[in-house]
Image: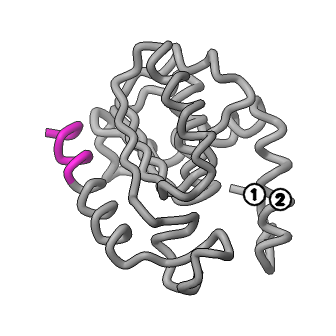
Amino acid sequence: MYGKGVRPANAAEAGKTAGAWKNDTAALRTRLQAGMNAALELEQAEKSKVGAMGYCFGGFSALELARSGADVKGVISFHGSLRSATPDDAKNIKGKVLVLHGADDDFESVAIINKEMKDAGVDYELDLYGHTVHAFTNPKAGNDPSKGVAYSAQADKRSWQRMEDFFAEIFK
């Protein structure tokens, strides 16, 4: 996603690199659409069953792909950044949206995306996992929620099941 050979070595570098893309919505969406187009050119691609999902910056990117008006049946964000520089673009969303988020992870942005999706008439769900912070699906995040990132086996398992159910629903 970041470009050929661009591989952040640590969280600080990843944040800086992702931040640059978050600040250039048009370029991000162009890159996301190009990736989707490349995937759809693959022989095994089912063009009528297109969805996107991602974790953290990938979750943010899945939401931005939907906001761009891409022809996707649905998108899922796992503990992604939820704020958009262009929230009015939610009116472009064609598919369903599923947000899987820790209840203790930037709760203010949950209220913002709730209003954004509701105002745009999007078919969406916000699943919040109690006592859960950012990076809840990553065992390498540690187990100390006071740091703002921590693994939660329960939220990880529940969110994965929710993803499977969502994809079964939109691709039936």
Is residue 85 shown left or right of residue 128?
right
Q: Secondary structure at mark 1?
A: loop
Residue 17's disc is 2
The residue that label 1 is drawn on is 2
Q: Position of residue 118 (x, y in %)?
A: 44, 19
Q: Secondary structure at mark 2?
A: helix
- Corner quadrant of residue 87: top right
Dot 2, how many residues are within 10 Å of its Cα: few (below 14), some (14-19), or many (20+)?
some
Closest to the observer, 43 or 113: 113
Closest to the observer, 57 or 171: 57
Q: Does 68 sit above or below residue 34?
A: above
The residue at the point 64 percent across, 55 percent down is 57
The residue at the point 53 percent across, 46 percent down is 38
**What's the magenta region?**
165-172
User: In this figure, which colouring scheme has been used for the structure?
Assistant: one colour
Identity of the amino acid at label 1? Tyr
User: Would you say the magenta stretch is mainly helix, strand or loop?
Assistant: helix
The residue at the point 30 percent across, 54 percent down is 163
| Quarter of the rendering occupied by the C terminus | top left
The residue at the point 43 percent across, 26 percent down is 71
Q: Position of residue 135 (x, y in %)?
A: 55, 68
- Corner quadrant of residue 152: bottom left
Q: Are marks 1 and 2 in contact (CB under 8 Å)?
A: yes
Q: Residue furthest left?
A: 172
Closest to the observer, 118 or 14: 118
Is residue 138 shown left or right of residue 83?
left
